[in-house]
Structures are given as C-alpha cells and as structure tokens.
Image (cartoon, rainbow, N blue to C red):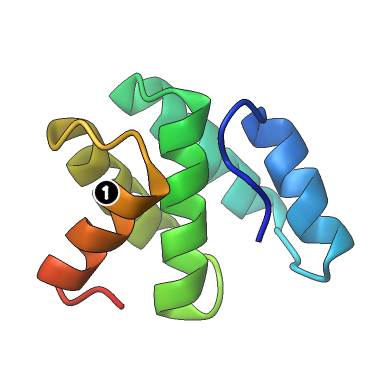
Amino acid sequence: MVILRNISTEHYIENLTAKGFVFKEDALGFIQFGKHYTGCNDVQVNLAIELTLKAQRQFDGSFFVSLLEEIKTEQIQTKKEAYELAKIRAII
C-alpha cells in the first residue's frame, strides 16, 4: 500500500487507480464531500479510503463518511492508530 503521510488525496486516489481500483464519479464526490464536511486533512481522508476499501472490498460512500467522522472525532493521524480503531470497532 502507498505511504499515506505527505501524499495528497488526489495523488493517493491516482495511485490506487493505477493499481486497478475503480472510483466512480459518485465515489469521488463522496470523498470530496466527506473531506469538506469533516474538515479532515489528506492523511485522515487517505486512511478512511484505505479502511473503507479493506472493510467493504469496494468504495461505499456512506461507510466512508461515517468512518471519516470517527477518525476526526478520535483525532487519528497515523496508520497504526487507524488500524487500532478499526480493530476495536470490528471494522476489519
């Protein structure tokens, strides 16, 4: 998986697309909406994208926004913290 620190969400999505993930237009809209709605930074958004794909095996917009809100509330900033949260919440 791509290192999430210091990579913009746009570049992160481009990297995932290059690896074969397909993001439909509505998925990209959910990502932008979630980012602006929560005020999350790119690292938090990228973590939410990664966990959404791992948990759902595809992009689920409502799951993503809910997860992003929780990442924001818990002030998650690292991959380790995100995976600990996912384990506690039985997301993955």
Q: Position of residue 76 (x, y in %)?
A: 26, 37
Residue at the image point whose x is 41% and y is 35% from the top: 44
Residue at the image point whose x is 14% and y is 33% from the top: 73
Q: Which residue, given by chain and number where applicable, does mark 1 sit on?
A: 81
Q: Is residue 60 visible to the viewer in this orientation of the structure?
A: no
Q: Is residue 85 above or below residue 77?
A: below
Q: Is residue 3 visible to the viewer in this orientation of the structure?
A: yes
Displayed quadrant of residue 11: top right
Q: Is residue 22 above or below residue 47?
A: below
Q: Position of residue 22 (x, y in %)?
A: 75, 66
Displayed quadrant of residue 41: top left
Q: Residue furthest front?
A: 80
Quadrant of image for the C terminus: bottom left
Quadrant of image for the N terminus: bottom right
Q: Position of residue 30 (x, y in %)?
A: 50, 44
The answer to which of 10 and 87 lies nearer the viewer is: 87
Type of amino acid under label 1: Glu
> Secondary structure under badge 1?
helix
Residue at the image point whose x is 81% and y is 46% from the top: 14
Q: Position of residue 13 (x, y in %)?
A: 71, 46
Relative side of 88 to 24, left or right: left
Relative side of 21 to 52, left or right: right
